[in-house]
Amino acid sequence: MAVWRGLWFVAIVLLGVAIAALRGIDAWRKEPVIATLHVPPAFKVARDFDFGRYRMSWSGRGLIVYPQGRPEKVLWAAEGGFLAAGMGQAVPGLLDSGREVHDLRDRLCREQSLEAFERLGSRLSLKGQLRCADGALSSYVLTLEDDGERGLILVVVLGDPALNRLYLSWSREAGERIFGFGEVSGVYDMSGRRLAVLAAGSRPEEEGGWSSSATQAFFVTSRLRAFQSQSSAYQLFDLRDPQRVGLEVHEGRLKAYIYKGDSLEELRALQSSVPGVVSTPALPK
């Protein structure tokens, strides 16, 4: 009997260790991927860049984009690193909590350098390198384009085609609430959650997700801003951090619309004018 009790105790201990290890792996996999930003000495000086009717103010460590002459109407902002990448492999048919794709991270590239600002007419491009944990490098280009009174077009392209995960983050204002991701959830504040958006043409039982298709990968905020992703890939919005929004895209490029209104009515009108928007969420008044 003593032998069996000993074996049973060992089995319980091993099971506990295995569960703890799995929880640790799961926690690491769901940890926000936040880049560390490196800039050359010359880029640590504050400067402004005008493109079209918009201006990007660079502080030396962060950026704010707004219409010229209206610095209070911030469309997009980031502090520190804002872009990372990696390689991942989604496990077919396996979901986390019935919603998120179970994704295995094979490589992460979260050392971001910013090495050039290039302005061409109504476009402003930010260029640099992403360094991976194994020392590999990939170039990237993030372009902001004047989209008229509506706002901005944001495009991100990774140079290394092997990188199939893109992680973009940007700042939230204090107390900023987030709504959207489909008609049903449009009236609820989504802050504090991770929200998955299905790839176009996929089925919920295959990938899981809050929205039924990638065309609903948009949200609006209590600060009268909106973000509309045009990616057809699986995406995951991380709204757990009150100071930033994180977006994970399962491909190496992203196109999105960013816009801001002076009222909910104007914001709804701007949303309906963006290609791919199939419905406008109801917002608290």
Image (spheres, grey):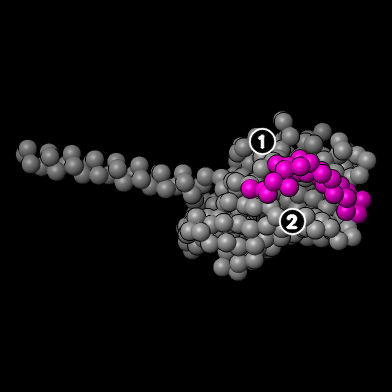
Residue on which the image places disc 2: 116
Nearer to the camera, 69 or 215: 69
Tell me: 193 left or right of 267. Answer: left
Residue on which the image places disc 1: 243
Q: Quadrant of residue 124?
A: bottom right
Residue occupying the point 70% across, 55% down? 115
| Residue 59 in picture, x, y percent from top left | 76, 40
Tell me which numbered mark, 1 or 2, is placed earlier along the sequence. Answer: 2
Q: Which quadrant holds the C terminus?
A: top right
Against 97, residue 189 (above or below) is: above
- Count the numbered circles shown: 2
Against 203, residue 60 (above or below) is: above
| Residue 227 in picture, x, y percent from top left | 76, 49
Based on the picture, tell me whether residue 19 belongs to the magenta stretch: no
Circle 2 SS class: strand
Circle 1 SS class: loop
Question: Where does the magenta region start and end?
Answer: 38-65
Tell me: 45 left or right of 138. Answer: right
| Residue 80 in picture, x, y percent from top left | 66, 42
- Closer to viewer: mark 1 or mark 2: 2
Residue sticking out furthest to the bottom: 161
The local crowd at label 1, few if under 14, some if 14 to 19, many if 20 or more residues have their Cα within 10 Å, is some
Cα–Cα span, label 1 and label 2: 26 Å
Tell me: 149 left or right of 198. Answer: right
Q: Amino acid at mark 1?
A: Gln
Residue occupying the point 56% across, 68% down? 162
Residue occupying the point 41% across, 44% down? 24
Q: Amino acid at mark 2?
A: Ala
Based on the picture, tell me whether residue 44 belongs to the magenta stretch: yes
| Residue 75 in picture, x, y percent from top left | 81, 44
Nearer to the camera, 268 or 25: 25
Q: Which quadrant holds the N terminus?
A: top left
